[in-house]
Structure formats: C-alpha cells, structure tokens
Amino acid sequence: MKMKIALLNLPFDANYGGNLQRYALVSFLQKAGYEIEHINLRFNYQLPWYKLPFSYIWRILQKITIDNKKHIFVEKHLKEEANRKNKNAELFYTKYIPHTHIITKKNDLYKLPHYDAYIVGSDQVWRKAMTKQYGLSTYFFDFVKEGNIKIAYGVSLGSDKNELTSKEIENLGKLYKQFKTTSVREDSALQLFKSYQWTSPQAIQVIDPTFLLTKNEYIKLIDSGSTKPCPGELFCYILDNTLQKDNIIQHLASEKQLEVFKTKLDGSVSIEQWLRSFKDAQHIVTDSYHGLIFSIIFNKPFTLIRNEKRGNARFDSLLTLFDIKINSNSIDWNKINLKIDEEREKAMKFIQKALNSKNA
C-alpha cells in the first residue's frame, strides 16, 4: 500500500510560481511512489456574524459621506474578483493536484483524515505576514497530533531579518521540535533558526520544488495545454510595476531589438501559457523569484530587478547557490545545469530519508 501524504502550503490563488511549486512537489512525490493529497486551503471572504451589523452600517455611512464608489458588500466583491482571477489556475489545480475538500476555517483542519506523513512547503509558509488568516502555527502543523511524521520541505521565511516576537519564537519552537526533519529554501533561514535555537532537528538547505522537475518535463506540461506562440521575444514578468522598471524594459528592447510582451500576476493567461513565455523568449525581465527560477530552468538570459517589498533574501540565496552574478552577460549554463542535477539529487535523498518508515 502506498504511503499517503498530506501537503500543506499557502492558500490557493492565481500565483503562477505558487501553483507550479505545488505541482512540481506533487509530481516529484508521485513519481517516487507516494500518494499525495493537497490540503485545499482557501481565503475566507466572510465576516464573522457578530461583525456584520456594525460593518454594514459603517460602510453605508462611508458610502454616503465619503466615497460613493465604496462597496458595501466588500467580501462578496473580493470573492467574485478572486474567482475571476483564479479561473485558469483552478483548471490547472483540478487537472493536476489531488486535493481535499475546500477549507476556509482553521477548525476544519482538525477534521481532516489521518495521513501517514505531513509535509509543509515550499514558498513563504513560515513567514508571519503571509499566513495571517490561518496563523503561522498552522504551518507548523499545530492541528496534527504529536508523534505523526511532520516534514518541512524548502520552507521560506521570506526575509533574512527576524520578524517574530520572543514569545512567537518560543511557542513555534515547541512545534518545531515535533518535526522529524526540516529543510529551508534560503541559506539565511539557517542563521535565523540558529538564533531562535531551532536546532533539533537540524535544518538543511534544499532547492525550490520547481527545480525538482526538468526543463523537458515542463515542456511536456506546456505541450499538454492549449497555448499560442508568444507575441514577442522580450518576456517581462513584473509583479510591482514602476516607471523605473518600464524604463529598463524599453532600454533593453531598443538595445537588443526585441519585441516586448508582458504578463502580470493577474491570472489572465493559463499556467501552461505562462511557462511557454519562458520557453519562447530570447531574454527575460523580472522582479519575481519564480520568474528568476524559470529563467534559470530554461537557460534564458535575464535581467533581474530586485524587489525589496517581496524579499530580496530569496534572490540573493538563489544567485549564491548557483554562483550567478546578477544580470551577468556570460552565464555558464552547463555548469548551472549540473548544479541543478546535484541539488535535485540532494533533495530526493532528503525526501526519501524523511519518509522512510524505518526511521519514523
């Protein structure tokens, strides 16, 4: 009988990188012979019943006196917007990711069936700012009884600075000790763990799950979808647009004589089409962590625009791991591809050892 594993990461949304890191980890584990079920967390767009009367009265007053365009039923509007943006990602998720029923409340996590093992990761699942709805302790499996196999794969704190209070460090540290084994995505997290005295188990650094699949596997994924040739050669995947970034793009387009095409983080294209953008492009401009990763996977020259808002520690760690100088004109892709293979093998051994029932 296959070992059944529950996978937990950030709530489902239209984020291309988030969906692909989930897909890659699920696919990797399935190929290794495990049965995976993703815990289908969703954002909750409902107000608690006791807040409803006051909130609606206050919004009506604001609409009358301050802003006529203000939505009275904000939650309904947000949910409709999310459904629109998530349409393509939902199709992808339904097709490729085995999952539980939709969960929108913390209490529902306690009602999940028993699994042989529980994996959390990757992405910024251990960053407080990213886990507000369910609470950071959820991503330390506080809803799973002690004694179960708990594994952290490539978890990210998102920053190289401490963002936790001393009380949070103490309480989360108790949950940390319940993990069988842990790994982080950024090398800076190892130093933070040491300062928190989270040393048992001793974490190691592993690659982002998206590196667990090869370029050819992503090409097969592209070919399995309904995609179109890209309308240019300079692919721009910008999360936070600014005039400075626009100027950089226009300068590169003029210098390299390339046609610009862009995708935003708005779910407007399918995940397969987004991937094809990296495959078809001659050069990539991005301020996105996974934009950088897929530039590397597809061996494409890139211009990385650092993004402090979303955490530069992630970029620094990745560039250091592959010994890439930012926006270098000469990258040894053969050397980098060998490093990816080496890190993939390391990750595979980490997962196999963690899930070996003899060590449970």
Image (tube, rainbow, N blue to C red):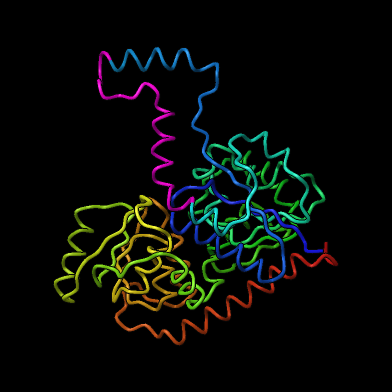
Magenta stretch: residue 29 in it? no
Name which quarter of the figure residue 166 lies in.
Answer: top right
Left or right for 198, reference 328: right
At x 68%, y 41%, the residue is 171
Where the C terminus falls, by quadrant? bottom right
Q: Position of residue 74 (x, y in %)?
A: 39, 27
Looking at the image, residue 158 lies above or below residue 185: above
Q: Quadrant of the N terminus?
A: bottom right
Q: How many tags in the picture?
A: 0
For the point 25% across and 70% down, the residue is 234
Q: Who's the residue at 37% across and 76% down the image? A: 325
Q: Is residue 85 magenta-colored?
A: yes
Q: Position of residue 358 (x, y in %)?
A: 85, 67
**Residue 158 versus residue 47: which sits nearer the camera?**
47
85 displayed left or right of 186: left
Q: Residue furthest left?
A: 254
Relative to residue 209, is residue 304 drawn left or right?
left
Most common secondary structure along the magenta stretch = helix
Query: 138 or 314: nearer the eye?
Result: 138
The location of residue 109, given as percent across then percent down, is 68, 40
Q: Which residues are magenta?
A: 64-90
Name the residue at 61% across, 34% down.
105
Q: Which residue is outermost to the right?
A: 358
Toward which corner of the image does residue 2 lie, by quadrant? bottom right
Task: Name above or below for residue 242 compared with residue 230.
Answer: above
Residue 64 spot, x, y in % from top left: 27, 13
